[in-house]
C-alpha cells in the first residue's frame, strides 16, 4: 500500500501486478480490503489491480463536508493518471462504488473498457431516503460510527445459509467502526444528492456485468435484474447464499461470473 498524491488530496492505494488495468471501488463505509478475493483472482490472471480507499474512507483523509459521487470519480480519474495506468480499465464497483461508476461514465468515459457492478442501484434516493441520510450524517458526527455499524450488521449479510467466513464479517465491521465520522458524513451527504442514472443504462456502450447477492436487501435482485434488462448486452449473475456483500460472502460464485465475463470480453 502507498500514498498517492493527487492535486487536492492523497489516497491510500494498493497497486499490484502488471497487465491490463482493473480498478476496484469499494462501498460505503468500507475500504479496499473488501475486494481481497477479487484482488487474488485478477492478479492470478495477469491484470494490474488498483484498489484505493476513496476520499474520507479507509485510510484516505476526509476533506469536505460533502463528497459528491462526481468528486469520487474525479479522484479516481486523477489516480489512474497519477499511476500511469493505460486507459481501458475494467471498473469493478460495489454499491456506492456503483454510484461512482455512473459518474465515471458521465465524466471520464475514456478510462473505461468494461464495468462490473455489484449490489448497487441506478435510482437516486427518494426525498425521504435522502433526508434520512442527512440525519444519519448528523448522528455519526455527534455520536460516532457505532450505531451505523449495528444497523449494517443487520443489513449487509445473507442469513444463516451464507457461505461467508466469520473472520471476513468481523474484519468488515472493524473497518466500519474505524471509519472517520467526517468522511462517512461527507459520503452520506454526497449519496443523498446523487443523480438518477436510470436513463444512462440504455446508452451504456460498453460491456457490463451486474452481480447481486440473492439475499441482498439494500439493492435487491429485482432492482438489479431490471438494470441488467435495461442495459444493452449486459450480463447478469445472481449469487447464491449472499447478501449485499456478495464479493466477500460467496467469492467463488462471484469470481466464476467474473471469469465468464472476461472470457467474453475480447
Ligand atoms: C454501500 O454499500 O455502499 C451502501 O449500502 C450504499 C448506500 O448506502 O446506498
Image: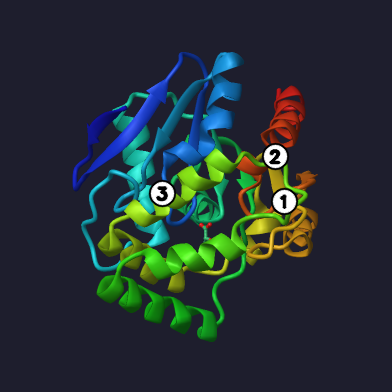
Return the x and y of residue 220 as percentages of the image width and height.
72, 63
Return the x and y of residue 79 as percentages of the image width and height.
33, 36
Q: CA distance from mark 2 to mark 1?
A: 8 Å
Report crowding for label 2: few under 14, some 14 to 19, many 20 or more residues within 10 A (C-alpha): many
Q: Is residue 193 visible?
A: no
Q: CA distance from mark 2 to mark 3?
A: 20 Å
Q: Nearer the viewer, mark 2 or mark 1?
A: 2
Q: Which residue is mark 1?
A: 213
**Quarter of the rendering occupied by the C terminus:** top right
Confirm or reject: label 1 Cβ below 8 Å from ligand 1: no
Dot 3 lies on which element? helix
At a point 71% along the width and 57% down the height, the residue shown is 202
- Lower position in the chain sequence, tag 1 or tag 3: 3
At a point 58% along the width and 30% down the height, the residue shown is 37
Picture disc at residue 174: 3
At a point 50% along the width and 41% down the height, the residue shown is 34
Q: Between residues 169 and 213, which one lies in front from this camera angle?
A: 169
Picture disc at residue 98: none
Q: Taking 15 as reference, is 195 left or right? A: right
Report crowding for label 1: few under 14, some 14 to 19, many 20 or more residues within 10 A (C-alpha): many
Name the quadrant containing residue 264: top right
Residue 224 lies, with reference to residue 34, above or below; the image says: below
Q: Which residue is mark 2?
A: 250
Amino acid at each position: 500500500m502507498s500514498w498517492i498524491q493527487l492535486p487536492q488530496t492523497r489516497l491510500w492505494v494498493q497497486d499490484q501486478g502488471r497487465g491490463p488495468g482493473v480498478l476496484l471501488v469499494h462501498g460505503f463505509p468500507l475500504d479496499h480490503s473488501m475486494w481481497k478475493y477479487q484482488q487474488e483472482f485478477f492478479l492470478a490472471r495477469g491484470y494490474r489491480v488498483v484498489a484505493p480507499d476513496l476520499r474520507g474512507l479507509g485510510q484516505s483523509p476526509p476533506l469536505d463536508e460533502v463528497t459528491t459521487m462526481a468528486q469520487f470519480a474525479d479522484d479516481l480519474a486523477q489516480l489512474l493518471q497519477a499511476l500511469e495506468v493505460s486507459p481501458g480499465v475494467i471498473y469493478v464497483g460495489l454499491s456506492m462504488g456503483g454510484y461512482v461508476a455512473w459518474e465515471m461514465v458521465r465524466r471520464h468515459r475514456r478510462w473505461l473498457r468494461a464495468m462490473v457492478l455489484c449490489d448497487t442501484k441506478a435510482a437516486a434516493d427518494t426525498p425521504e431516503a435522502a433526508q434520512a441520510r442527512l440525519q444519519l450524517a448528523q448522528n455519526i458526527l455527534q455520536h460516532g460510527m457505532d450505531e451505523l455499524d449495528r444497523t449494517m450488521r443487520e443489513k449487509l449479510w445473507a442469513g444463516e445459509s451464507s457461505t461467508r467466513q466469520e473472520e471476513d464479517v468481523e474484519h468488515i465491521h472493524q473497518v466500519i467502526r474505524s471509519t472517520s465520522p467526517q468522511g462517512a458524513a461527507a459520503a452520506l451527504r454526497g449519496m443523498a444528492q446523487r443523480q438518477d442514472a436510470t436513463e444512462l443504462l440504455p446508452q451504456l456502450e460498453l460491456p457490463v456485468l451486474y452481480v447481486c447477492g440473492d439475499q441482498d436487501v439494500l439493492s435487491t435482485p429485482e432492482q438489479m435484474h431490471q438494470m441488467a434488462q435495461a442495459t444493452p448486452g449486459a450480463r447478469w449473475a445472481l449469487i447464491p447464499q449472499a447478501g449485499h456483500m456478495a464479493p466477500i460472502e460467496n467469492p467463488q460464485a462471484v469470481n466464476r461470473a467474473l471469469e465468464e465475463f472476461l472470457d467474453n470480453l475480447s
